[in-house]
Each structure stands twice: as structure tokens, then as C-alpha cells.
Image (cartoon, helix red, strand yellow):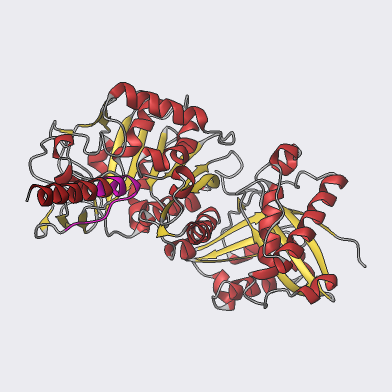
């Protein structure tokens, strides 16, 4: 009998440890009580929101937590960025996603940031709308952060506050480790939520004294949430969208899914981003709406999965850190960019040879050439948008690119060359028999800039045929043409009508309301004709 009891106790202990470990990688819901109606938003009550996941997702001891965050920040090597206006950061346990989160937060160190709007997706509350906790402070083992007075004003927006209904599902680890959880009293949508809490110690370390607006994001339209947040923005305010990416796929499957998600975000492609697998999809979409309006430019800082940080590549969770930055040239949304920074002849040859090797290896062997970052020139190592175009007998055979800077130029050429050969949906994959017939052209892009215009006629006057690449956004749809397309469509109205149709809209949709245009320039170069 004693042996049976011991055996059952061992089974229960193992199950408990498994659930706690999975809680750190990402949490799932458990059954909860019936739905209740949220109270109307009021002024803060003087209560402090206590830490719920200290000791589970990150260390509970203040010294250990401080040292842990310091070490993660010291290891991060993000590219230098100015005027950071928003971040997308993951929210798993620090041993899983902490290295990726540190890439984003390191960019805030030493900056004049006084207010952080933290968008945290709900995992434990079925919430209609969004919710701002009615508290005066937000506590972690590193201390208590003040809640901004702007929180009460924001809570009056329609997508917040009183009409929402909610039901809390306490997480499994609440039963397994009750000694780590303080007494909360009545549950709220924020009581057990980890997705916002894990961001706060990073913010405390890099910002020191700041005020917080914590937003729990339930079932709410991202555009409505962006509408509510935008009036609260200024040069000392940063928005943080908390989100992991794909969940519980094999390592290779996760890489493909996460790449598609990051590409949609960095291209500000809201339609595609809506289809991606990310638990914080609504916070991400909210930042994307704000970025499109404000001219913020996204840059991928780091992307990896729990398979990279733990070595277990069976079922992984994906993480990415993305910064959105305003620049003097993008914020006014009114001026075309200047010419690209030209590459040297040797750099051009290197990229063309690299694209040729990429296509050959991808088609014949299913692998890709390795790029040694340490041997790259500054220009080739700089994150840059680019397109690779394949032609065969003078006819298009594939063209794929990244509009916005995502990775070093040399690596971007590898990625886009492979995609142009194998993934262009307009054509079947390139076959080995075709390799000798292909001609390769590379287009290196400047960062797109918003183009302000007062009417369709004003737009046609401001575009520069032959010089401007054009990104046309019509509602959630978007399409782009490289400047080279002007050779086939020299008339501005014809150019825009064809671009609207490429976006899946009627030809005259570019003349309607809600249209946005960005322009960029390219440095294009190609192989010698054979």
C-alpha cells in the first residue's frame, strides 16, 4: 500500500513540474466561473497590483531578478536606433524569451521615456473589449511603478470600460504553487495575467522612473484601440505590444510560420498580419495601425524560439523583438526620399554571385549558402530592403522582396533569391533545367517614406515616373511596384490603376478615400547578358 501511495505521489509531482515548466513557455486556459460585467472605469483606488508570476516566469528574489535582467541586457546587441516609439516583445519565462525581449528594451536605456502604454493580451480572462486595472501602482520584486494619470482618461474610450463582459480562468499553476501567489481578493482580468507583468522588470531596469498605462486586451478591434491610444502619444511615450509568435510546432514549422509573421509586421501588411499565429495579435495590429498613421518604421531586432534557448526542438514557441522608430524624414509624411547609397562594383558582384549560388543550391540541393557576417562590408551588413527579379528569355520568371529593412543586405538577398525561385505564387518553382536560362537583377531599396497628397490629381503630380517605387495601401490591402515597372506603365494613372488591381481592388480605387501612398527609390543592377 505504501508503495502505491509513493508511486501516485511521484506521478502527481512530475505532473506539477511539467505544468509549471509549460507555464513559463506559454500558458493555457483552465475552466473558470460564469461571466461578469466590468464596473465602469473610475479614478485609481489607491490599490497596488501585486506580482502574480514572480518565482514562476522570472525570479522572485529582487537581487536575483536584477542580476538576471542585467545579464540579458548585456548580452543583447541590437542595431543602433533612434526615436523608438513602439516595441513588440515576447512574454514567456525569462529563460525562454528573455534574450529576445532584451533586444528591444536595450534600445530604451538612457532615453527620455516618461510613459509606457503596455498592451497585454489576456490568457486567463474571456474579456469583451479592453481593460485598465483600477490601481495606483504596479508592483514587481524591483519595486512599484506609478500608474499614469492618463490611464483614467484612456479608460473612457468606447473599447474600454463598463460594457465589457468577462470570465476569469485561473491558471493551472495557481493550484500547484499557491505559496508563490499573494492574496488578491476578487479576481479581475489582470489578476493572473503574465503577459504584461513580465515586461515591467525590463522597463524598470532600463528606464528607472516612469509611469505605466497597463492595458489588458481582450476581444477588441485593433483599429478602435489605436484610435483610443493615439491622442495619448507624445515624444516621451512608448507603446509596448506583448506577444509571442507561433505555439507548439516543430522547430522547422515554427521557423516558417514566424518568418511569415515577422515579414507581415515589418511590411506593415495588416491583412497578412491578421492571419498569423500570435497570441498578442491584437496588440501587434494596434501598433501597426499607429505605425502606418505616424510614419514609424519597423525593424526586426531578434527572432528565435524556445528551441534555440533551451535546445528542445520538439514543440516550440516563437519569439520576436521588433522596434518601430520615427525619423525626421518619415514623421512629416510629405517628402520623397533621396537616392540610395550606391554600392561599390565589388559589392554588387558579391551580391549577384550570392543570388546566383542561392538559386542554384535552393533548386538542386534544397539548401542555402551560408553568409559570414564577420566578413561583410558595412553596407552589406546593414539591414536593407531588397528585391530579386528572375527573368527567362526576357520574361518575368519570379520576383520577391522585402520592402522594409529586416536583416543584413547580404542575408536579405539570400532569402529573396530563394523565394523568387521557389515561392512566387504566379509561377511554378524553378527547375534545374532552367538554371542556365535565368537572368538575375537585384534592387536595393531606400526606406519607404509617406507621401502626402490632397487629391488624386495632386498624387499624380507628385509621383516621379521612372524614379519612385510606390506602395499603395487601400484599406487593409497593399501592393507595390518597383520603379522599373514605369517602363511598362509610363502613364501615372495607368500605373496606379494597375497597382490597385494588383492589391485586389477595382482599378479606380486609388482615387477613393482611405488611400495611403509611400514611395522609395532603388539601386538596381543585374548580371551581364549572356
**Which residue is at a point 55% across and 78% down the rendered structure image?**
506
- Please determine whether, in this image, residue 219 is positioned above or below residue 57: below
Q: Position of residue 370 (x, y in %)?
A: 70, 50
- Please determine whether, in this image, residue 65 is positioned above or below residue 39: above
Is 96 left or right of 470, judged from the image as shown?
left
Residue 23 counted in the magenta span: yes
Counting every numbered tag in the picture gives 0
Q: Is residue 458 visible?
A: no
Front-lying residue, 342 or 487: 342
Task: State which quadrant residue 433 falls in.
Answer: bottom right
Q: Position of residue 279 (x, y in %)?
A: 35, 55
Give the magenta range. Answer: 19-30
- Please determine whether, in this image, residue 520 is positioned above or below residue 529: above
**Which residue is at a point 77% across and 61% down the rendered structure image?**
466
Q: Residue furthest top?
A: 63
Q: Position of residue 147 (x, y in %)?
A: 25, 33
Residue 161 counted in the magenta span: no
Quadrant assignment for the C terminus: bottom right
Front-lying residue, 299 or 349: 349
Q: Is residue 451 visible?
A: yes
Is 69 left or right of 449, judged from the image as shown?
left
**Which residue is at a point 30% across and 34% down the rendered structure image?**
212
Front-lying residue, 528 or 41: 528
**Which residue is at a point 47% across and 38% down the rendered structure image?**
104
Task: State which quadrant residue 376 falls in.
Answer: top right
Q: Position of residue 315 (x, y in %)?
A: 41, 57
Amino acid at each position: 500500500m505504501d508503495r502505491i501511495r509513493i508511486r501516485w505521489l511521484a506521478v502527481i509531482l512530475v505532473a506539477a513540474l511539467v505544468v509549471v515548466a509549460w507555464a513559463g513557455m506559454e500558458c493555457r486556459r483552465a475552466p473558470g466561473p460564469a461571466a461578469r460585467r466590468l464596473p465602469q472605469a473610475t479614478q485609481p483606488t489607491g490599490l497596488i497590483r501585486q506580482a502574480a508570476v514572480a518565482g514562476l516566469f522570472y525570479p522572485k528574489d529582487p537581487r536575483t531578478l536584477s542580476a538576471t535582467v542585467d545579464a540579458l541586457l548585456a548580452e543583447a546587441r541590437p542595431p543602433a536606433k533612434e526615436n523608438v516609439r513602439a516595441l513588440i516583445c515576447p512574454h514567456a519565462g525569462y529563460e525562454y524569451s528573455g534574450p529576445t525581449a532584451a533586444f528591444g528594451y536595450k534600445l530604451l536605456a538612457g532615453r527620455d521615456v516618461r510613459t509606457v502604454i503596455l498592451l497585454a493580451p489576456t490568457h486567463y480572462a474571456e474579456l469583451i473589449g479592453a481593460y485598465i486595472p483600477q490601481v495606483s501602482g504596479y508592483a514587481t520584486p524591483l519595486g512599484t511603478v506609478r500608474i499614469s494619470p492618463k490611464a483614467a482618461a484612456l479608460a473612457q474610450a468606447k473599447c474600454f470600460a463598463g460594457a465589457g463582459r468577462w470570465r476569469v480562468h485561473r491558471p493551472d499553476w495557481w493550484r500547484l504553487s499557491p505559496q508563490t501567489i499573494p492574496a488578491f481578493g476578487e479576481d479581475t482580468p489582470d489578476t493572473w495575467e503574465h503577459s504584461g507583468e513580465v515586461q515591467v522588470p525590463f522597463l524598470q531596469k532600463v528606464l528607472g522612473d516612469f509611469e505605466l498605462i497597463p492595458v489588458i486586451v481582450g476581444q477588441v478591434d485593433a483599429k478602435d484601440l489605436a484610435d483610443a491610444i493615439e491622442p495619448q502619444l507624445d515624444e516621451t511615450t512608448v507603446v509596448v505590444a506583448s506577444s509571442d509568435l507561433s505555439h507548439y510546432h516543430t522547430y522547422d514549422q515554427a521557423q516558417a510560420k514566424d518568418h511569415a509573421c515577422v515579414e507581415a509586421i515589418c511590411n506593415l501588411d495588416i491583412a497578412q498580419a491578421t492571419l498569423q499565429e500570435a497570441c498578442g495579435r491584437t496588440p501587434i495590429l494596434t501598433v501597426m495601425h499607429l505605425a502606418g498613421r505616424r510614419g514609424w518604421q519597423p525593424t526586426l531586432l531578434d527572432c528565435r524560439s524556445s528551441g534555440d534557448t533551451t535546445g528542445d526542438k520538439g514543440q516550440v514557441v516563437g519569439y520576436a523583438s521588433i522596434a518601430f522608430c520615427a525619423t525626421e524624414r518619415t514623421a512629416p509624411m510629405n517628402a520623397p526620399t533621396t537616392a540610395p547609397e550606391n554600392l561599390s562594383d565589388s559589392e554588387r558582384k558579391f551580391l549577384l554571385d550570392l543570388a546566383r549560388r542561392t538559386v542554384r543550391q535552393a533548386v538542386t540541393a534544397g539548401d542555402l549558402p551560408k553568409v559570414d557576417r564577420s566578413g561583410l562590408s558595412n553596407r552589406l551588413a546593414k539591414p536593407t530592403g531588397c528585391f530579386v527579379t528572375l527573368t527567362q528569355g526576357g520574361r518575368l520568371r519570379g520576383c520577391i522582396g522585402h520592402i522594409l529593412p529586416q536583416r543584413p543586405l547580404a542575408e536579405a538577398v539570400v532569402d529573396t533569391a530563394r523565394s523568387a525561385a521557389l515561392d512566387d505564387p504566379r509561377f511554378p518553382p524553378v527547375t534545374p533545367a532552367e538554371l542556365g536560362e535565368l537572368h538575375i537583377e537585384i534592387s536595393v531599396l531606400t526606406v519607404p517614406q509617406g507621401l502626402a497628397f490632397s487629391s488624386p490629381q495632386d498624387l499624380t503630380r507628385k509621383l516621379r515616373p521612372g524614379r519612385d517605387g510606390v506602395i499603395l495601401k487601400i484599406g487593409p490591402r497593399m501592393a507595390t511596384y518597383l520603379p522599373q515597372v514605369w517602363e511598362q506603365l509610363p502613364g501615372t494613372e495607368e500605373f496606379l490603376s494597375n497597382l490597385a488591381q494588383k492589391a485586389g481592388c477595382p482599378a479606380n480605387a486609388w482615387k477613393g478615400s482611405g488611400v495611403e501612398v509611400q514611395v522609395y527609390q532603388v539601386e538596381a543592377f543585374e548580371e551581364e547578358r549572356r
